[in-house]
Amino acid sequence: MAYTVKQVAAMSGVSVRTLHFYHETGLLKPARFGANGYRFYEEPQLLTLQQILFYRELGFELKQIKQILGRADFEKVAALQSHRKVLQKNLSRTRKLIETIDKTIQHLKGNRKMKSKEMFVGFSVAAGDDRFGEQTKLGDGPIDCKVSAQDTDGAMCVFESTGRSGWPRDLHYEQDEWIYVIDGEFDFQIGDSVEAIDKTAIQGEQHQAGRLAPTPSFPPLPELQRRWKTWNETHKPFRVRPGESVFLPRKVAHVWARVSEQPGKIINVYQPAGQMEEFFRQAPKWKGLPSREDVVNSTYTAEQIDALRRLFSTHGMRVLGPPLIVGMNI
């Protein structure tokens, strides 16, 4: 059955103007056009609109939603199951908060004495839990969101990472990063600003209006490896231990890795939140990335490096080199 844009607007609560906008941006195209030029939508388009509304409800931006829905491996059933899991977690938290409100009202009215710890039920995220129950495992340990962009209106997000061995050498265009070490020891290298890098390093990559533009390719792999070796020789690492922290400014190259034998644990703060939550969701699913063994043994390919670069650039970051390979983090 086909529906006009007005009928879709009536049943979905999305305005005709917004549906027109979704069409113009390529987010939701009609199934067909009538002889009179009217847009007509069928069940596949309605299901896509439903996905858009779910992702909007969960706090995603339209450009993020378009990227997700446009992926070749996107599956509606899997997405719905993921939405249900998140909403169920949110529902459980909402119920706890409502219960806390009711108990507080009774306490203030003098009808029931409230224990001090009961005042904060529903606000906290327990150890080992993710803010939305979406624990992500990258490399050798989980990454849990503790404070979401939804909690701070995009001002910041906070993650707890266990056992991580660090990311490729990279930089963030729009975010400052602060890392606090809870367990283990880590080595950090902090390097040049993006302006200095652009004078001598990888060409063709541009930052426009807060996002990376598509770029042709990296230089040949031997040239990249030569540059990375030079960077290591000119930027000596420093050790960070439990109770210590490191501030990593935006637009400044950095890389870090666990060096202690035991798993490490850190608190990682991004300000503003940007797309980091979506980055951690997408990274385990991204196709064609080099494995850690590839990096350690220098057996990665130009195609794998390009896939890694696309992952980072899609989420507002720039890859500048391989991870820091030191001691036990291998």
Image (spheres, rainbow, N blue to C red):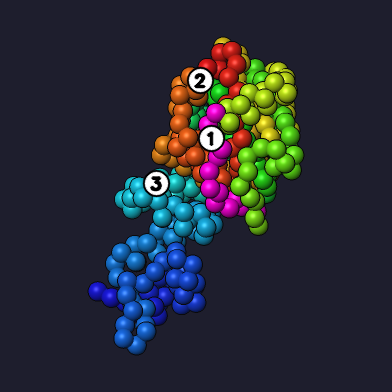
Quadrant of residue 251 in the image? top right
Give the image location of residue 184, x and y in percent: 62, 17
The amino acid pointed to by label 1 is Pro
Give the image location of residue 130, x and y in percent: 51, 37
Give whichever of discs 1 and 2 has the lower sequence position: 1
* Mark 3 element type: helix
Residue named by callout 1: 220
Tell me whether circle 1 and circle 2 mark residues in contact (CB < 8 Å): no
Q: Is residue 324 magenta?
A: no
Q: Nearer the viewer, residue 177 or 90?
A: 177
Q: At 37% across and 84% down in the image, what residue appears? A: 37
Tell me whether circle 2 and circle 3 mark residues in contact (CB < 8 Å): no
Q: At 51% across and 60% down in the image, what residue appears? A: 62
The prevailing secondary structure element of the residues shown in magenta is loop
Give whichever of discs 2 and 3 has the lower sequence position: 3
Give the image location of residue 7, x and y in percent: 36, 78
Give the side of residue 330 with respect to residue 185, left or right. left
Q: Is residue 194 visible?
A: no
Query: Taking 205 as reference, is 284 above or below it?
Result: above
Quadrant of residue 48 in the image? bottom left
Give the side of residue 75 with respect to residue 14, left or right. left
What's the distance in space between the residues labelled 3 and 1, CA to CA? 40 Å
Q: Residues within 10 Å of mark 1 (few under 14, many from 20)?
A: few
Q: Nearer the viewer, residue 107 or 154?
A: 154
Query: Taking 228 as reference, is 70 above or below it?
Result: below
Specify start and end residues of the magenta stretch as a single range. Answer: 210-222
Give whichever of discs 3 and 1 has the lower sequence position: 3
What's the distance in space between the residues labelled 2 and 3, CA to CA? 34 Å
Q: Residues within 10 Å of mark 2 (few under 14, many from 20)?
A: some
Badge number at residue 296? 2
* Mark 1 element type: loop
Residue named by callout 3: 82
